[in-house]
Image (cartoon, rainbow, N blue to C red):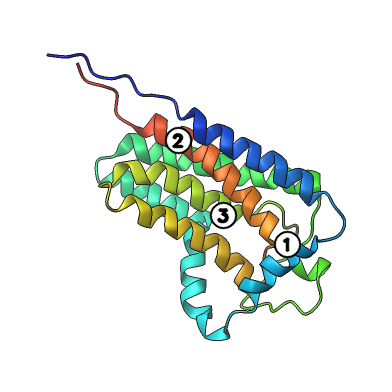
Amino acid sequence: MTAARPRRFPWARVVVGAVGLAASTKAARAEVVHPVEDRAFRSFNGLPSALLPPSFVLMQAGSYVALLGVSGVLAVTGRHRAGVAAAAAGTLSWLGCKAVKARIGRGRPPAHLEDVATRGPIDTGLGFPSGHSAVAFTMAGVVAPQLPPSLRPLVHGWAVVVGTSRMYVGAHLPLDVVGGASMGLAVGAVGGWLAAPDPVN
């Protein structure tokens, strides 16, 4: 019997996530929104209002409540290690966003731009980075390896939709989403690595 391959640490995703977070954090410190970011935001925020019901439902999948729900489902279906990893990694991302928000102090879109379409409950507080995006990408990083390869792109695609939906409802600017997604990519990669079963010889 051949020896099992050791689990490889996901250095590439961790580095990409860390670099993305650092770069977006530096850009988010600016007091004005760059025209490129403005245009990117309006390309999503200006979509038809008819998209609100499905967007609102999908967006909630990036909430902390959804994180606990996914962790519970993993645990009760026998994936205890993945359930714990998802809960721990998601909580770390969520708390990390809170810490970065307090340090950067960037407001929500209406604080920086005019004619912002806000849909649904109005979000208050600080904007960078997006906690919904961070949690969604973290969960995708932990959950995707637990699924058949054919379903994994759907999980990552769902995380992207969570981020774009936050711009659509007027809750976040593009850099907020990039920062949150980057944090979630890095933390989720580590969480997924920890959730993977140990190699069997």
Sequence-first tag of 2 and 1: 1
Q: Amino acid at mark 2?
A: Gly
Q: Return the residue at label 1.
A: 37
Q: Amino acid at mark 1?
A: Glu
Instruction: Kindly give the residue lying farthest to the right in the view shown.
Output: 31
Between 110 and 79, the one lying in front of the other is 110
Sequence-first tag of 3 and 1: 1
Quarter of the image where the C terminus is located:
top left
Between marks 3 and 1, how big is the CA–CA gap?
17 Å
Q: Residues within 10 Å of mark 2 (few under 14, many from 20)?
A: many
Q: Residues within 10 Å of mark 3 (few under 14, many from 20)?
A: many
Q: Please report contact status of discs 3 and 1: CB closer than 8 Å, yes or no.
A: no
Residue in view at x 46 percent, y 51 percent:
67
Between 141 and 121, the one lying in front of the other is 141
Q: Return the residue at label 2.
A: 191
Q: Return the residue at label 3.
A: 133
Nearest-to-viewer mark from 3 and 1? 1
Is 93 on the left or on the right of 38, as rendered?
left
Task: Return the mark for residue 71.
Answer: none
- Mark 3 residue element: helix
Is 100 on the left or on the right of 181, as rendered?
right
Between marks 2 and 1, how big is the CA–CA gap?
30 Å
- Determine whether 122 is above or below 184 in the image: below
Q: Quadrant of residue 22?
A: top right
Is 195 on the left or on the right of 103, as rendered?
left
